[in-house]
Image (cartoon, rainbow, N blue to C red):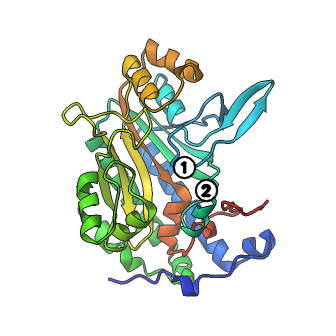
Amino acid sequence: MTSNRRTAAAEPATPRSPREHLSSPVTRSVLRIQHRMLTAVREFLSARGFTELLLPIIGPVTDPGARGAKQVDIDFYGHRYKLMTSAILYKQAALTTFDKIFCIAPNVRLEPVETASTDRHLVEFHQIDVEVADASRDQITRLVEELVRTVIRDVTAALPDDFDRLGRDTGAFAGLLTGSFDRRTHTAAVADLRDLGHDQNPDGELDWAGEALLSRKASKPFFVTDYPKGSRGFYDRESPEHPGRLRNFDLIAPEGYGELCSGSEREHDYATIVTRMRETGENPAKYAWYLRMVRDGIPPSAGFGIGLERLTRYLAGLASVREASAFPKVAGTVSP
């Protein structure tokens, strides 16, 4: 099975202006696909009893686990607030209202300038964020699989002319529409990379080059599970059976597109969260509102966040994630 993903050599030149980008037939097809994706996501989750919420885009703290990216501070009436790097803390808190929630959340991360060359990082992006009370990792990864499969089936059936216009062979998705996605632990992924001659740190995140290497060798999406404690935020639950390992996962796309989604069972015990904050160098006092909610009781949960523009890039077979945004912002480039 082959895809028609455009290679770097065939990559379109950076548009000279927002007008040139927005008026491009390619952009129009990509945004039509993205719109249909969002419609399918909302239909899928609403039919399963999820409630869509509009979560904050500013707050006194945000997710500290954003992999090398800087946070953006704003002055909120004399108080230093943050633009959200992810909705994770608010998702956990929102489960005191509904057992199953989702949101299409805007996020801002000042990514390192070197990410401009990865073709998969944007400074401003959106996540399909989902959280479920009393769910396990196995349950939430099955939900991710079903959601991704449903969206791809729906969008490819609805918009064949747009996929043709983009040169995307939708036959590339045939393998993922049936059967489960493969799973491998972080330890196994590190071993695979070392067998391929890539010197991956066993105690850290899979680096971008290693992740792309594994992605290029895959024919359908796969999960990487059990990241080492310390490589992710304090909210990913540590495995009681395997101390030092987290009950989390990433979903990696095939064909070199890399990570689409991160998720986890969540830590909800007050004392454990405070300890984990201190272990990662976070000051618990900054998280006062969140810790008050945790102390008073939030449900155990599991959830995930799918990068909307990354999933769009994968479906549409785009050379760069910047093509998946109407108004892309790439690290180091001043743009409207």
Contact, mark 2 vs mark 1 (Cβ under 8 Å): yes
Residue on which disc 1 sits:
68
| Location of the N terminus (image quadrant) | bottom left
CA distance for labels 2 and 1:
7 Å
- Secondary structure at badge 2 equals loop
Q: Give, as a three-letter code, the residue at label 1.
A: Gly
Viewer can see residue 140: yes
Above or below, comparing residue 323 to residue 35 in the picture: below
Q: Give, as a three-letter code, the residue at label 2.
A: Pro
Identify the residue shown where x is 33% and y is 55%: 145
Q: In terms of depth relative to the viewer, which is nearer, 94 or 271?
A: 271
Residue on which disc 2 sits:
112
Question: How busy is the neighbourhood of tag 2: few (under 14 within 10 Å), some, or many (20 plus)?
Answer: some
Q: In x, y percent, where is residue 335? A: 77, 62
Identify the residue shown where x is 50% and y is 36%: 88
- Secondary structure at badge 1 equals loop
* Quadrant hosting residue 24: bottom right
Say whether residue 135 is left or right of residue 69. Answer: left
| Location of the C terminus (image quadrant) | bottom right
Q: In x, y percent, where is residue 192? A: 25, 65
